[in-house]
Image (cartoon, grey):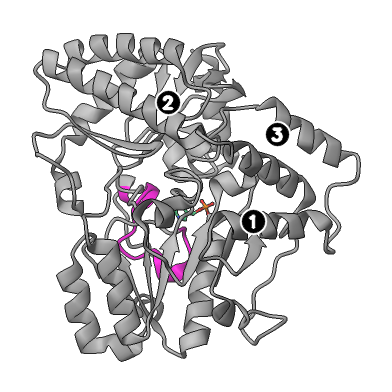
Amino acid sequence: MSRSEILFNSAQRHIPGGVNSPVRAFRGVGGTPLFFKHAEGAYVVDEDDRRYVDYVGSWGPMILGHSHPDVLEAVRAQLVHGLSYGAPTALETEMAELICSLVPSMDMVRMVSSGTEATMSAIRLARGYTGRDSIIKFEGCYHGHSDSLLVKAGSGALTLGVPSSPGVPAAFAKHTLTLPYNDLAAVEQTLAEVGQEIACIIVEPVAGNMNCVPPVPGFLEGLRRLCDQHGVVLIFDEVMTGFRVALGGAQAYYGVTPDLSTFGKIVGGGMPVGCFGGKRVIMEQIAPLGPVYQAGTLSGNPLAMAAGLTTLKLISQPGFHESLTDYTRCMLQGLTERAQAAGIPFVTTQVGAMFGLYFSSADSITSFAEVMASDAERFKRFFHFMLEGGVYLAPSAFEAGFTSIAHGQTELEITFTAAERAFARLG
Ligand code: PMP
């Protein structure tokens, strides 16, 4: 038995399913999850001392690659001053200023400790600000696991086939209207009927929790227009896309400005961090300035701020996102060529340093229905063949992939060699 198998057996005695977050359990691909003990640059190392080129990057934060020396040093330097104070620090102001300068729609920002908290709080704020109860989200989009948002959700909920969770009271779920992603006509019609009841539309500007589905031209622009018409708060959930698809996030990439945004992952540089923010007039409704309550014992944690600040500064260097995007493009092109050579129907999507892989003969993938029509069984086999070739992809056909600045020529070659063998074995 491998050490991962031994550890997974022990883990299941006291941890539900042996994991602290469901997608990690490999239910989407079968087999035993790998237990990791080390990560550096573009690589993760498992308990059996096998190294893998990592396209998960802790599900997005590790845009600099793992264990970047400057990030580790910043955390070490902060460590000697204590772990948490529960009082304001200069680091938090520096973080707020940096976020607001990198993302122009952000006038004010509140730090939290996860993406779930960020979206949950942004929605409460939108409800408090508008005095309306209902929200619109899109099928296959995942915004964390708070009650209002676990309705037809993506990510682990989709992988496990429980997109609407037991435990969410029907009385809560009825306030969440779920519409098809990329279907502006559906939004237009719904707002025409019940626009007065809708507090906010929350959207992943690039859907990354049902694999990777970019917005069709006009979708985000249309949401902006419709929200303005109906007095609805537009929330971009940039937990995944923020600081990744472009330095200023998807809102910079597509040139559409939301009222509120949520961030996570990269903003904490690998530490548990999220944040939400946006228009001053809305953010001023948050306690202690306003009546909408939101709080957190560890919010703005100094170690987390040190890791996040260092990460954001490093990725602000000119050319950073262009290099990442180039690597991602080359990698996807190489995979596509090898799939074609093997006669395997294969489609990829890409926005900056975020990508999707589909076993599908569709011309393009723009909807949840098209994602669901792709061959997830084939992906499972591909995933394991790639693992054997030393490449770690997201263990589900319904998650986006991520690249880092530490990925280079060597990693490209490892990926291509693994893919060539994997496609041949699929055939
Ligand atoms: N929103 C999006 C777009 C996400 O991708 C995720 C997590 N992958 C979340 C929210 C929830 O973040 P967290 O897991 O940190 O609670």
Which quarter of the image is occupied by the C terminus?
A: top left
- Above or below, 269 against 327 in this view is below
Q: Residue 422's x, y, as percent?
A: 25, 14
Q: Residue 7's x, y, as percent?
A: 57, 25
Read off the magenta span: 144-158
Q: What residue sits right under mark 1 in the picture?
A: 113
Give how far apart the Cα atoms at labels 1 and 3 are: 18 Å
**Of pointers 1 and 2, the one earlier in the residue sequence:** 2
Q: Residue at x 33, y 22 (%)?
A: 331
Task: Please state which amino acid type lies under the numbered disc 1.
Answer: Ser
**Of pointers 1 and 3, the one earlier in the residue sequence:** 3
**Of pointers 3 and 2, the one earlier in the residue sequence:** 2
Q: Which residue occupies the foreground of this view, 142 or 290?
A: 290
Checking the image for residue 88, the label placed there is none
Q: Residue at x 39, y 63 (%)?
A: 150
Quadrant assignment, res 362: top left
Q: What residue sits right under mark 2 in the picture?
A: 32
Q: What residue sits right under mark 3 in the picture?
A: 71
Give how far apart the Cα atoms at labels 1 and 2 are: 29 Å
Helix, strand or loop at mark 2: loop
Question: Few, some or many C-alpha atoms within 10 Å of disc 3 (few <14, some 14-19, many ≥20)?
Answer: many
Q: Are marks 1 and 3 in contact (CB under 8 Å)?
A: no
Give how far apart the Cα atoms at labels 3 and 2 are: 31 Å
